[in-house]
Amino acid sequence: MPEYPELLVDLLRHGETEGGNRFRGRTDDALTEHGWRQMSSAVEERPAWAEIISSPARRCTLFAKHLAKTHNIPCRQAEWLWEMDFGNWEGMTATKLAETDADRLNAFWQDPLNQAPPGGEPFQQFQQRVLTGWHETIQHTTKSVLLVSHGGPIRIILAKALGMPPQNLMRLEVPHASLSRVRISTDSTGNIYSSLVGLNTGTDD
């Protein structure tokens, strides 16, 4: 089998966030001190990337900018790396929603692909946003890159790399500060091949 040029893309989820576990898509909470340490630990022994691309959320971009400045790496923000917008559920805990909106919460848990949170981003729109940005990135990047993002976008990218149907997304665990790696190869006719090199390395809960 001929060898083709390869691109390595690392995917880093943000660390622990202030406010605890809740529906946090566009809610812009900051990292806790522990969350900051988690992310630092995850990338501690990694070689320098040619570029860092981050979600605009504070829990992602503040660390990304710090890492970029420390290692003199270009860093930019990308809207497509935002988490899913949870609409009216933004900032709420599942426990609270179980008291106030139990039927719609249960519908969402059972069928997140077709049951969007009220006022939230439909899954198909979310998936298209992420994959459009992903394809543009891997088509215009030739060197190793670090993406700093959230659980949802990372799951979508990993599922795409593995050829998994979206119904199985939640089978992919993406803990805080987890670091995963995807290898991208492109043949002479432009066909793109992807493989999962590492999953959830560097986690420190």
Image: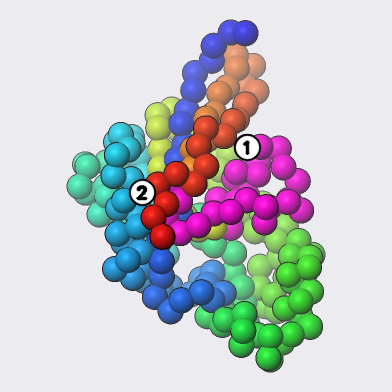
Q: Quadrant of the C terminus?
A: bottom left
In the rendered image, is residue 14 in sight?
Answer: no
| Extreme residue in the bottom direction | 100
Residue wearing tag 1:
161
Looking at numbered disc 1 in the image, what kind of residue is underneath it? Ala
On screen, residue 167 above or below 74: below
Residue positioned 76% across, 61% down in the render: 113
Residue wearing tag 2:
42
Residue positioned 76% across, 76% down in the render: 106
In the rendered image, is residue 117 in sight?
Answer: yes
Instruction: Give yes or no for residue 132 being in the magenta stretch.
Output: no
**What span is in magenta?**
152-179
Query: How would you classify the magenta stretch by its main secondary structure?
Result: helix
Q: What element carries label 2?
A: helix
Residue positioned 57% across, 81% down in the render: 93
Instruction: Give yes or no for residue 158 being in the magenta stretch.
Output: yes
Q: For mark 1, does the 10 Å Cα neighbourhood hold few (<14), some (14 to 19), or many (20 or more) residues? A: some
Q: Is mark 1 on a helix, strand or loop?
A: helix
Q: Where is residue 7 in the image (x, y as percent from the top left)?
A: 47, 28
